[in-house]
């Protein structure tokens, strides 16, 4: 944990009732984190090249930092909230546990971005016959605590080579026999002639909060933000569908509409046997579904994206 004399601690002197949210300054989580905040209605007045972004329409400011600093900024209550990868949180949690300390950040939401996995990968020509083949091998990683926990759970004795970056070139340099690194598409592994063989952890971005009890005003805004985040996550795949149909076809249409709750049925002026159906579908609506709807008698089918939803 950082000492109270560190630079971060000085920033916490701010007594304003404004929330501080830590976001990665420059990296894979930056754009999707800012995109989530914009969708939640936040207008930030400064660019992301600055340390701080000022929320113009909410009492919420964004602090741009390295992702590795986010767990400590939040558990030391310098920031109230943080957006960070589960992989970074888990590594920090285990690192603290190894020193007999308990992590104090609280996960409040799992988010649908920053998806990747911490995986083992071997050089293309190397054989891999299950985890047993790791015994006695040297494994390069920037996540030594997670790798150590994994190896212990599997009861495998192997050497962990801790690096601060460029893990994927370690086998070629003769520093390790295989690697344990973050993978999403797999293209970096491919470019380095490595083959993914085992997933150690599935990761995604999470929202964490301080362990400290917040003032009423901050608490209210955290609640509002969480409700907006839930709304944003819900509408991602949601579609609003409108169509005309014979009344008799309603049971079949209901069955076809993906993930929709009770649709609104409106009589169609001048056509007693026909109705208008409006429904929110919580899953994407594919062409196949539209074709099936048409087959059971639907016409004038319109599919619209849903921008906001409040349950
Ligand atoms: P910083 O300078 O902030 O320390 P970094 O180099 O540690 O940056 P990035 O490579 O930008 O971090 O990754 C940030 C996070 O993005 C990772 O911790 C992980 O949660 C997520 N992520 C998603 N896909 C990948 C991937 N293919 N490789 C690495 N991280 C990924
Ligand atoms: Zn980092």
Image (tube, helix red, strand yellow):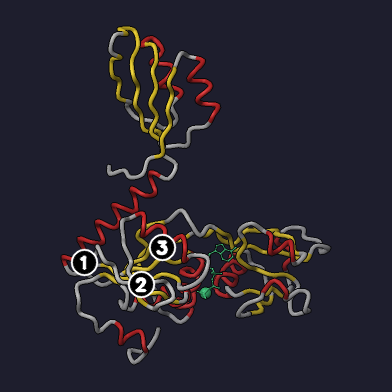
Q: Which circle marks residue 46 in the picture?
A: 2
Disc 1 from disc 3: Cα separation: 20 Å
Q: Residue at x 25, y 56 (%)?
A: 224
Q: Residue furthest right?
A: 125
Q: Position of residue 221 (x, y in %)?
A: 23, 61
- Label 2 CB, ligand 1: below 8 Å? no
Q: Nearer the viewer, residue 17 or 212?
A: 17
Image height check: is 232 above or below 170?
above
Horizontally, residue 38 falls left or right of residue 32, namely left
Q: Which circle marks residue 218 in the picture?
A: 1
Looking at the image, is mark 2 or mark 3 nearer the viewer? 2
Give the residue at mark 3: 34
Q: Which circle marks residue 129 in the picture?
A: none
Looking at the image, is mark 1 or mark 3 nearer the viewer? 3
Q: Position of residue 25 (x, y in %)?
A: 45, 73
Quarter of the figure with residue 71 = bottom left
Looking at the image, is mark 1 or mark 2 nearer the viewer? 2
Q: Residue at x 64, y 56 (%)?
A: 185
Q: Quadrant of the N terminus?
A: bottom left
Q: Which secondary structure, mark 3?
A: helix
Q: Residues within 10 Å of mark 1 (few under 14, many from 20)?
A: some
Dot 1 or dot 3, earlier in sequence: 3
């Amino acid at each position: 944990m950082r000492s109270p004399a560190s630079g971060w601690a000085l920033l916490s002197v701010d007594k304003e009732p404004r929330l501080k949210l830590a976001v990665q300054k420059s990296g894979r989580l930056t754009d999707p984190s800012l995109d989530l905040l914009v969708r939640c209605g936040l207008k930030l007045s400064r660019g992301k090249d600055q340390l701080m972004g000022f929320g113009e329409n909410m009492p919420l400011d964004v602090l741009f930092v390295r992702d590795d600093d986010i767990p400590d900024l939040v558990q030391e209550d310098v920031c109230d909230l943080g957006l960070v990868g589960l992989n970074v949180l888990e590594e920090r949690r285990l690192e603290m546990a190894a020193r007999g300390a308990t992590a104090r950040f609280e996960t409040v939401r799992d988010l649908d971005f920053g998806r990747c996995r911490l995986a083992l990968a071997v050089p293309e020509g190397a054989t891999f016959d299950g985890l047993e083949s790791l015994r006695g091998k040297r494994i390069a990683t920037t996540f030594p605590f997670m790798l150590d926990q994994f190896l212990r759970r599997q009861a495998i004795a192997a050497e962990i080579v801790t690096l601060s970056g460029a893990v994927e070139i370690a086998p070629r340099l003769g520093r390790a026999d295989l690697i344990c690194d973050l993978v999403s598409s797999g293209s970096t592994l491919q470019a380095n002639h490595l083959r993914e063989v085992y997933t150690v952890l599935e990761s995604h971005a999470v929202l964490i909060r301080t362990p400290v009890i917040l003032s009423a005003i901050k608490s209210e805004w955290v609640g509002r933000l969480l409700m907006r985040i839930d709304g944003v996550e819900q509408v991602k795949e949601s579609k609003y569908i409108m169509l005309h149909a014979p009344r008799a076809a309603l049971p079949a249409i209901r069955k076809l509409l993906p993930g929709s709750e009770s649709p609104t049925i409106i009589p169609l002026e001048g056509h007693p046997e026909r109705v208008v159906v409006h429904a929110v579908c919580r899953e994407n609506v594919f062409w196949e579904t539209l074709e099936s709807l048409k087959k059971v008698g639907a016409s004038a089918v319109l599919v619209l994206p849903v921008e906001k939803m409040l349950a």
